[in-house]
Image (spheres, coloured by chain):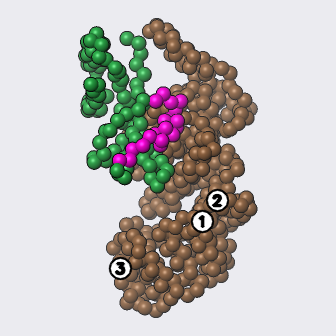
């Protein structure tokens, strides 16, 4: 069975971390990645830019409404994901508008978060 | 040599949008472009007083800033080479290319305004970025105009620029299929800047009047760089026409004067002429939109010699057209008032009451003020007083409250 692991953390704490703490955090991630890779169960792991870079696309009356920030309502839960390599945010927004979010007539939304490009280790 | 430094600042203010837009295209970063521009400003302040003002000041600034960008790129590359990260080479190379011809189309400022007003940025960020980059206002000036602290405003700009960079908001004119919607966002930002200044409460009146002037300046620029769009002309015309009444809107005590009671000799005739010509030209293009219609309504008001000569039937017809495009409760309310003025207060009151039954207007102070005015014209004093009191309960702006209180007292 493949499982997805969603990392939740306090953004303000991460933003104010010292370089030493940051290195430690990175090393801890690498340790898990190395171990899972060695077991042959690693499928992927990437950090996201903070929510300040998020854009939400919500369909309203058949056309996409673009909003700044994460706007998922509390009754809306994470249901899946796409990773697409787009030229820019406009292309990402155009794809987001095509991804279905509705469920039994209830509307949902797509939150777009840029993935941080990591330098080689 | 104080005149030289004043001249330098005036040139920077005037050319800010054009130069920063060109620099951002060259280096792909708002921050680096701004840093280069600051450096060029410092260089101009050192050189111009001694060596005289260059023949083409804008080109001088652009060249100085561009040189700074190249320096920054070289330093960045050296730093990166040390860290053995040569894959960035390609992006650096792009801004070492010589400056493209300034006449290259489309105008860089157009890409810049579309980036600043991108829907993935919130309204406050759009407004602040537009005023900062295209208007060339300082963070202090913007903070004062919007009554927020300078650190708050600076933070807002940092966050917006980070989002543009990290989420890769494109720096280009949107493709045709998205253009109409994105243009509307740009127009809305400029209109909001104008309104912020126009509806200002007393006290901040002086700073905020500059916002009106700034919005008009931005709209002029928009007409210049996005010529095919009649709504841009409509927007500029509407703001010019409203702003033409600036001096007559508030009396010497700071109290609001209604259109009906304004001293029309205080209106700015030059601005009225320009606004009326612009709206005529825009309407002739044959693609009518809400800004053109609102400008046309303002034009009908401003061409009347006195309040009694106002062509209310024409205004009611224009509101009818506007309601077809944008049937918002406020448009419908204004339309009902215009009908009341042309066909009689009884008909106006009936339409207003009809609107009140089915919409959110009951919470809107001007709805009750309009209703009170129709009742006053009909001679129903008690009912009018009730409506003025209801309007007063809901009105927040001091100038408007004073006006309503005076109307109530005069019944």
Q: Colour of chain A?
A: green
Q: Earlier in the sequence, mark 3 or mark 1?
A: 1
Q: Which residue is mark 3?
A: B389
Q: Report how far apart the C-alphas of labels 3 and 2 lie in the structure.
A: 36 Å
Local crowd at mark 1 within 10 Å, few (<14), some, or many (≥20)? many
Q: Is residue A95 magenta?
A: yes
Mark 3 on the same chain as mark 2: yes
Q: Is residue A118 visible?
A: yes
Q: Does the CB distance between marks 3 and 2 fall below 8 Å?
A: no
Mark 1 on the same chain as mark 2: yes
Q: Earlier in the sequence, mark 1 or mark 2?
A: 2
Q: Is residue B19 left or right of residue B159?
A: right
> In the depicted view, which residue is nearer to us: B323 or B118?
B323
Q: Give the letter of the chain under mark 3.
A: B
Q: Colour of chain B?
A: brown
Measured along the vertical axis of the image, is residue B48 above or below residue B280? above
State the residue at coordinates (62%, 75%).
B317
Q: Give the letter of the chain under mark 1.
A: B
Q: What is the x, y in percent for residue B204?
A: 45, 57
Q: Report how far apart the C-alphas of labels 1 and 2 lie in the structure.
A: 8 Å
Q: What is the x, y in percent for residue A30?
A: 29, 14
Q: Earlier in the sequence, mark 3 or mark 2?
A: 2
Local crowd at mark 2 within 10 Å, few (<14), some, or many (≥20)? many
- Number of disc labels: 3
Q: Which residue is mark 1?
A: B294
Q: Which SS type dominates the magenta stretch? A: loop
Q: Which residue is mark 2?
A: B234
Instruction: Find numbered disc 3 in the image and state the secondary structure of the residue it sits on.
Output: helix
Which region is colored magenta?
A: A84-103
């Amino acid at each position: 069975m493949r499982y997805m692991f969603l990392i939740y953390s306090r953004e303000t704490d991460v933003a104010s971390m010292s370089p030493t703490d940051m290195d430690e955090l990175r090393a801890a991630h690498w340790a898990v990645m190395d171990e899972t890779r060695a077991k042959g169960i690693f499928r992927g792991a990437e950090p996201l830019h903070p929510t300040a870079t998020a854009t939400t696309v919500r369909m309203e009356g058949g056309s996409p409404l673009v909003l700044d920030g994460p706007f998922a309502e509390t009754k809306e839960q994470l249901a899946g994901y796409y990773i697409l390599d787009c030229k820019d945010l406009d292309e990402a927004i155009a794809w987001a508008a095509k991804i279905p979010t509705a469920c039994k007539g209830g509307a949902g939304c797509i939150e777009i978060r840029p993935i941080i490009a990591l330098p080689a280790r | 040599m104080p005149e030289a430094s004043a001249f330098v600042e005036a040139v920077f203010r005037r050319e800010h949008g054009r130069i920063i837009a060109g620099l951002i295209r060259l280096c792909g970063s708002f921050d680096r472009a701004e840093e280069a521009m600051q450096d060029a400003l410092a260089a101009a302040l050192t050189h111009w007083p001694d060596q005289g003002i260059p023949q083409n000041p804008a080109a001088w600034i652009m060249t100085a800033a561009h040189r700074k960008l190249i320096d920054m790129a070289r330093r960045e590359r050296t730093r990166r080479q040390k860290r053995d990260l040569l894959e960035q080479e390609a992006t650096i190379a792009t801004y070492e290319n010589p400056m493209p011809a300034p006449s290259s189309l489309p105008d860089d400022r157009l890409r810049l305004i579309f980036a600043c007003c991108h829907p993935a940025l919130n309204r406050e960020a759009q407004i602040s970025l537009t005023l900062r980059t295209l208007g060339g206002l300082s963070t202090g000036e913007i903070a004062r105009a919007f009554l927020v602290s300078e650190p708050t405003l600076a933070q807002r700009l940092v966050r917006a620029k980070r989002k543009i960079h990290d989420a890769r908001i494109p720096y280009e004119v949107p493709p045709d299929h998205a253009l109409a919607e994105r243009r509307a966002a740009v127009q809305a930002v400029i209109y909001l800047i104008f309104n912020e200044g126009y509806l200002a409460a007393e006290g901040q009146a002086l700073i905020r009047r500059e916002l009106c002037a700034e919005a008009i300046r931005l709209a002029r620029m928009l007409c210049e760089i996005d010529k095919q769009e009649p709504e841009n002309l409509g927007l500029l015309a509407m703001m010019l026409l409203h702003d033409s009444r600036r001096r007559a809107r508030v009396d010497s005590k700071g109290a609001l004067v209604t259109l009906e009671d304004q001293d029309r000799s205080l209106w700015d005739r030059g601005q009225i002429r320009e606004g009326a010509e612009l709206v005529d030209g825009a309407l002739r293009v044959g693609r009518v939109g809400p800004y053109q219609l609102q400008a046309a309504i303002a034009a009908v008001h401003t061409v009347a010699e006195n309040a009694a000569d106002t062509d209310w039937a024409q205004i009611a017809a224009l509101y009818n057209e506007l309601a077809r495009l944008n049937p918002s409760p406020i448009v419908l309310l204004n339309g009902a008032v215009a009908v009341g003025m042309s066909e009689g207060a009884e008909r106006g009151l009936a339409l207003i009451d009809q609107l009140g039954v089915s919409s959110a207007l009951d919470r809107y102070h001007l709805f009750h003020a309009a209703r009170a005015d129709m009742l006053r014209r009909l001679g129903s004093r008690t009912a009018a007083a009730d409506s003025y009191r209801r309007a007063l309960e809901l009105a927040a702006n001091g100038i408007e409250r004073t006006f309503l209180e005076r109307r109530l007292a005069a019944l």
